[in-house]
Image: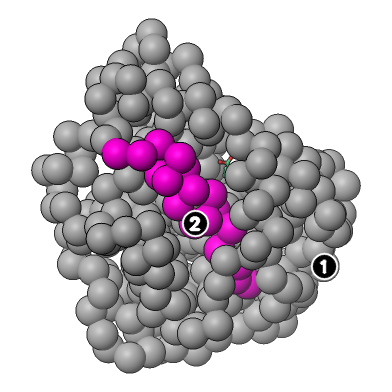
Amino acid sequence: MKNLLESLVENNRIHVSEGKVASYIPELSKTNPSDLGICVVGLDGKEYGAGDFEKKFTIQSISKVISLMLALLDNGKRNVFEKVGMEPTGDSFNSIVNLEVKSPDKPFNPMINAGAIATTALIGGDNQEEKSERLLEFTRKITGNPEINYNEQVYLSEKETGNRNRALAYFMKSNGIIDGNVEEILDLYFRQCSIEGNCRDIARIGAMLSNDGVIPWSGERVVSREVSRIVKTIMVTCGMYDASGNFAVHIGIPAKSGVGGGIMASVPRRMGIGVYGPSLDEKGNSIGGAHVLKGLSDELDLSIF
Ligand code: GLN
């Protein structure tokens, strides 16, 4: 497995020059566009890494999966999907237009920014600090990594410049989709996006999901089978934004990307995969990461379809 991963990284490094690192969050523009790495975590707990798999990055939109799980645990399926839908959009992740013209009562799904902000608003806790601590504790548990933390620079950088997300959130407040203090909800959203980890950390989240909500290395159940199924399904239909259809056809694995360059993937009952390559395509998905995943999917016949 290790040799296979190494050759996939080396053969696909060439693709990183076809994309660009995200710069709309100024702090992200400092990342090295040629980084590329992968980690696979099997359901027997065995881990294999290649390339830059130990480099840390901010998980950005991969955190949408984490906040969705927490919101489902805290509120139940019915209450969550009363506020946010489960349909793909075919539009970019930070699109505003649907919220006004097509779906003013609820954002389309929890994987686009509007839907994720509405989901984050449902995370339980008595105050801001408790909510932020719960998010971190949950992430530490599902990654098995007690050192997971927020990246303060990236958090502050997005908080300062995230006016598009601010627009989405205030619009949703005016339509009654979100309750409570908008700036606090945004603050928690910016924090979750700045959670820092490496390929192994996100591969472990994928492994837990592929094991139907049970952490493979400890046997502990962290989410129900139903929550794990809901999350993986929404990853297939919406996880790669408006490239989700293409990704499903060519790679066929439930996955969630982030503009930090990570992709977390979960092959049901087989393995979790984390890839990292901050050079992004025009949809905001890791270009080298997607090529490596495609190579692995072809080689090991991982498509679920
Ligand atoms: N923090 C980013 C944003 O809200 C997350 C987007 C992403 O990873 N696609 O714009």
> Quadrant for ligand 1?
top right
The type of colouring in the image is one colour
Indicate the amino acid at tag 1.
Answer: Glu
Magenta segment boundaries in residue numbering:
180-198
Quarter of the view holding residue 277: bottom right
Indicate the amino acid at tag 2.
Answer: Gln
In the image, is the residue at mark 2 within 8 Å of ligand 1 by its beta carbon? no
Residue closer to the observer: 27 or 58: 27
Residue closer to the observer: 178 or 256: 178
Identity of the residue drawn at 52% across and 31% down: 166
Element at label 2: helix
Identity of the residue drawn at 18% across and 67% down: 224
Residue closer to the observer: 140 or 252: 140
C-alpha distance separating marks 1 and 2: 31 Å
Residue 287 placement (x, y as % from top left): 72, 47
Q: Which residue is mark 1?
A: 10
Q: Which residue is mark 2?
A: 192
172 relative to 127, above or below = above
